[in-house]
Each structure stands twice: as C-alpha cells, then as structure tokens.
Image (spheres, rainbow, N blue to C red):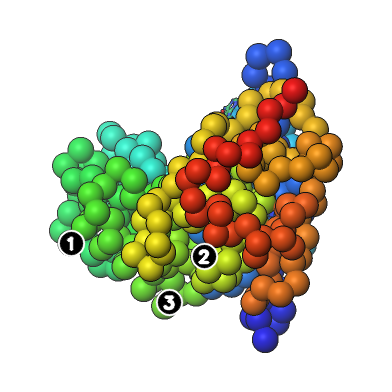
Amino acid sequence: MDKTHQFTPALSIKDLDVDYKAGEHPVAALREINLDLFKGDRIGLVGESGCGKSTLLKAIMGVLPKNARTPNGQILLDKTDLLTTDGETRRKARWARISMITQSALNALNPVHKIGAQIEEAILSHKDMPKEKARERAKELFDLVGVSSERLDDYPHQFSGGMRQRAVIAMALALEPEIVLADEPTTALDVIVQDQIFDRLYSLQAEQGFSIVLVTHDLALVVESCERIVVMYAGMIVETGNTKSITRTPLHPYTAGLRYAIPDLTLDHDPISIPGAPPDLSQPFQGCRFAPRCPMAIDACWQDMPSLEPVGQAEGERLVRCHRANEMNDFRDRLSQQDFWFSEIKTNE
Ligand SMILES: Nc1ncnc2c1ncn2[C@@H]1O[C@H](COP(=O)(O)OP(=O)(O)OP(=O)(O)O)[C@@H](O)[C@H]1O
Ligand SMILES: [Mg+2]
C-alpha cells in the first residue's frame, strides 16, 4: 500500500491562497494549494520561474514579505494552523521544526560573525543548554556536512561557495527539524559540488528521517532523487504524484511539456520547449491558466478552471488539474513533438 495512506501528515496545507500587494492589482501568487507532507518524504517542487515555488516555501516557513496576504487557507503542523497561531508558537516552529535552505548562503549568514558562533547562537536561541554543549553540537554539524570543525571560527567570506552552502545546511539541521525546505539550494554551485551536497543532505535525511521539499529548475535532479513531484503552473498545483509514474506517463500537458524538454536517450525525439510565457498573475482570468499555451485546449478549458482531481489508472496517488487528463494517452506522443505545440494553439480572442 502507498505509504501516504499509513501515516498522518507531518504538515498539511489546505486551500492556501497567497496574494502580494503590488501596483494597482494584487498578484495572485498562490491559489488553492493543497499538499500533505509525510515524514521522510522527499518532494520535488517544479515549475517555471514565477509560478510560486518560493512563495509556497516562504508561507510554510512563515517568512512571507510584508506585502503578502493569505486570504484563505491553513498550514497545519500537528493540527496547529501556522497562519493563525500566536507569534511565539510560530517562532518556535521556525528552525526547530521547519527549516529552510535558500539559494544564497550569503543572505543566510551574517558576514560580521564567525560561522560557528552563528550556529551556536541558532541552537541557544531555541534550546536551553550550556554554551560548550552548543559548541560541541556545532562541531558535530560541521562533521555531518563535511566541513572541518577547525573552520568554525572562520567568517563567511573565508569560505568557498560550496562550504558556505554546507554551513547553511548545518544551520538548517542544527535543531533537528522535521521538515527541511530547500529553495534551489545549490544553484550557484558547480555540478560536482552540487552532487556532493545532495549526497550529504540525502544521507543525513536517511539517518534523521526529516522530510525535504526541494525546489529546483533541474527536473532531471528531481527525477533522479525525489520520490514525489509537485508540478506548479501560475500559482497552482497542476499535477502531483509518484516521480517514476509521472515521468513515464505525464497526465497534464504542462507536465508533459516539462518532461519532454529533458533530453532523453530512450525517447525518439529532440527535446522540446513550451512556446509562450506564463500569464500575468495580477490580471483576472477565467478557465485554465495554461489554456493560452496548451495545444490540447478546448472550449471548456477557456471557460472553467479544472480542479485538482485523482486520475484513475495511474500507479500511486496521482492528482491532475486538467479537463482532458483522461485523454492523455492519445496525446502524449504528439506532445513530445515540438510541432504539435505550435500547431493547435488557440488565441484568447
Ligand atoms: N515581494 C513580492 N511582491 C510582489 N510580487 C511578488 C513578490 N515576490 C514574488 N512576487 C510575484 O509572485 C509570483 C511568484 O513568485 P515566486 O518568487 O514565488 O516564484 P518562483 O516560482 O519561486 O520563481 P523562481 O523560479 O524565479 O524563483 C511571481 O509573479 C512574482 O513576480
Ligand atoms: Mg523562487
């Protein structure tokens, strides 16, 4: 049986909407987000730039900027709604239960303090323990992420990019969180260092059992390492499910587009690219947000937003937001061909 049926989720997001106040109209950055995260999960969150990946992680972490609003929804951690609970409960959850690794280690580290001292401080601000013990823990963490503990008294600028990113991972794991949110954690690093860091992060996950939500533009990395994928488009989840199953049989045309954009020797075609660009999220819309770019769009797609629904035959739990998900078997081959993406696109007029 799918393990998702056996456990209650570590974190449950229900009907979450997030708006940003900016300019004349608010930006509808997230809409109808529903997502359960289970202990030990490794979820890859993918989608084009601006689809709301970072907004979702920030909402979970409780670090949305001041111009953000959450008009709807809940983020439940043990039945406590992080969106409405008191500041103290939220502060305690942050780092101790949910931590975040961002792309820029430099933003996460204070340039004027020694790195070891910053980790100790992070520990001491949540845990009542003698300073020496926090120091021991910082040493241990450096060992875990593969940096010599002799470097604890260095300042961030004395570290290479890869070492800084390891230090940030050490910081994120300092309080043994249940959930680690990783927003393009290695984008700024070269591929070899990137691989080393993921190896380390994943082996720590195997030891400690935290769950990971990994945001990346690298779909191949997700396919390699995450057991579940969440595909977002224009602020909404359009497909989620088991990675292998989604890679084999994408059921949303957008997912198919992303999938066939990866070079793949087992497929008899060149990588495609999805023509067009995502919509302006400050403009009202009707129907499916992907319709303007979708070669399969029919009248219903322009009129009604499809809901995220289970689609039967797929292995594991598969949710898809597409009126034509059940017809995908007839379309998949065509979606792997670049020409098809240009051929039947309808205009919005
Ligand atoms: N502080 C802000 N104020 C106003 N709009 C914002 C703000 N932050 C993000 N947005 C808008 O919200 C939408 C979602 O942005 P977000 O940064 O979450 O996307 P993303 O998927 O993380 O993109 P990327 O892959 O480029 O990091 C975008 O339209 C973006 O322009
Ligand atoms: Mg982002």
Q: Amino acid under label 1?
A: Ser
Disc 3 secondary structure class: helix
Would you say the residues marked 2 and 3 are in contact, meaning their CB atoms lie under 8 Å apart?
no
Residue 108 picture location, percent across and down: 39, 41
Left/right of residue 299 with respect to residue 20 in the rendered view: right
Instruction: Return the residue at label 2.
Output: 247
Q: Is residue 257 left or right of residue 267?
A: right
Residue 239 percent across, percent down from the top left: 65, 56
Q: Please tell me which residue is depicted at 36% across the width and 56% down the height of the picture.
A: 263
For ligand 1, which image quadrant applies? top right
Query: Dot 3 corresponds to which residue?
Result: 206
What is the C-alpha distance between the residues marked 2 and 3?
24 Å
Q: Residue 316, relative to residue 135: is it above or below?
A: below
Q: Is residue 277 above or below residue 43?
A: above
Residue 107: image x %, image y %? 37, 36
Q: Measuring 78% from the left and 36% from the top, which residue is drawn there?
A: 302
Residue 148's disc number: 1
The amino acid beneath tag 3 is Ala
The crowd level at tag 2 (other Cα within 10 Å; few <14, some 14-19, many 20+) is some
Task: Name the residue nearer the viewer: 253 or 148.
Answer: 253
Given the image, on which type of amino acid does mark 2 rest? Thr
Label 2 element class:
helix
Q: CA distance from mark 1 to mark 2?
A: 39 Å
Image coords of residue 320 (percent x, y): 70, 58
